[in-house]
Image (cartoon, rainbow, N blue to C red):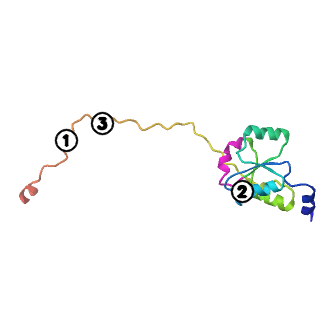
Amino acid sequence: MRSVLRARNKLVFEDIEFHVTRFVEPSQKELVRLIELAGGKVHSEKPDPKYLAQCIESEQPYIIISCENDARFLSYLAEAKLPIYNVDLVLFAMLRQVIEPLPQYRIPIPIVVKSHVFRQPPPYTAPSKEPVTSTASTPTPMEVSAN
């Protein structure tokens, strides 16, 4: 009953910006449609860290919805410690008509470590200058008598 009353007063995602990654389930297209029906604005491009910093400073809500398969594409946001949420945040917010950013909705962002150690190619080995001897052996007396 409370959810219905909340929905009549204000759309749950009104004035909230989102980015939804590609391989979420339900599909990205379906999730974007739900968010937009609930008043949210969805950005199709990955969020720019500068824009996210601006959103944080101005207290403009920006929510990133992803899944574990897509989280690696968001590793550039790991230093910002911005939470990335799974689709449950959206689905439960739609049902309850309130956003609850609970820890169980968060996805860990894998930190991609770029190695600055360059591997050296194997050392070049120059061919030997010694004459190559034939590996054919001389016939043994047994082999000679067989002929």
* Residue placed under numbered mark 1 in the picture: 133
Residue indicated by mark 2: 29
> Which residue is rendered at x = 78% and y = 38% of the image?
53
Tag nearer the camera, 3 or 2: 2
Question: Magenta segment, principal secondary structure?
Answer: helix
Tell me, yes or no, whether the two marked residues, 3 and 1, touch with CB atoms within 8 Å.
no
Position of 135 compared to 91: left or right? Answer: left
Residue that protrudes farthest toward the bottom in the picture: 1
Residue 44 located within the stretch drawn in magenta: no
Name the image quarter holding residue 28. Answer: bottom right
115 relative to 87, above or below: above
Q: Position of residue 92 (x, y in %)?
A: 81, 60
Quadrant position of residue 95: bottom right
Give percent across and percent down for residue 55.
81, 41
What amino acid is found at the position of numbered circle 3 in the picture?
Answer: Pro
CA gap between label 3 and label 2 equals 62 Å
User: Would you say 90 lies left or right of 132 here?
Assistant: right
The structure residue drawn at horizontal position 28% and vertical position 36%, both measured from the top left corner, is 128
Picture disc at residue 127: 3
Helix, strand or loop under label 2: helix
Label 2 environment density (alpha carbons within 10 Å; few <14, some 14–19, many ≥20): few
